Amino acid sequence: MVGDTDDVRQARQQGESGHRTVPHTADIRIEAWAADRERCLTEAVLGMVESFADVSGVRPTAVDRVRLAEGSDEDLLATLLDEVIFRLEVHGQVPVDVEADEDEGGLDVRLAVAGLRDVEITGAAPKAVAWNELRIGPDAYGWSCAVTIDA
């Protein structure tokens, strides 16, 4: 990705996945990367969660499955992040781990969740996914994505 630090570039060359937040006016900008699309999507979720909560050491209290209909990669990214925001706002659930697998005509996502009361809140909760400058796709090292989250 443009602006990668040497550490990020080296990790990506070695096939590692990850995410980071980058400065953005009044919102949260998340960049994620991985060897494949599904892992890149899950890294984006983990990056969004880390932008407002510390889930390290928190055990999940439930595992929920979400089935996302196949669409464009951008649609999948936005829909998955919107689902996490919905669960946070409506059910008070925060993912502590995420797995995604391509399935016939869609994406099968497993969210290991904990209650909002069980995590340390470290920032403003996400409110919406911005479509402006949202991107996901293959690159020189696998897949990468970037998304702005309204907080």
Image (cartoon, rainbow, N blue to C red):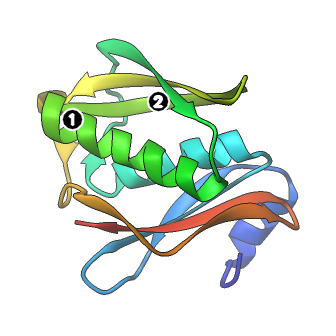
- 10 and 70: which is toward the camera: 70
- Asked if one can make out residue 11 in the rendered structure from this viewpoint, the answer is no
Up the image or down, 114 lies above or below 35; here it is above
User: Along the horizontal axis of the image, is 68 left or right of 139?
Assistant: left
Q: Distance from label 2 to label 1 (Cα)?
A: 13 Å
> Of the residues shown, which amino acid type is indicated by label 2?
Asp
User: Along the horizontal axis of the image, is 17 left or right of 13?
Assistant: left
Locate the C terminus and report the quarter of the image it occupies.
bottom left
Residue 68 point in image, percent of width and height: 53, 33
Up the image or down, 25 lies above or below 112; here it is below
Where is residue 144, by image quadrant? bottom right
Which residue is at 36% across, 48% downward?
A: 82
Q: Which residue is mark 1?
A: 119
Neighbour class for label 2 at 10 Å: few (<14), some, many (≥20)?
A: many
Where is residue 7, by image quadrant? bottom right
Tell me the SS state at disc 1: loop
> Label for residue 68?
none
- 44 and 21: which is toward the camera: 44
Q: Which residue is mark 2?
A: 97
User: Along the horizontal axis of the image, is 122 left or right of 65?
Assistant: left
Residue 67 point in image, percent of width and height: 51, 25
User: Along the horizontal axis of the image, is 150 left or right of 34?
Assistant: left
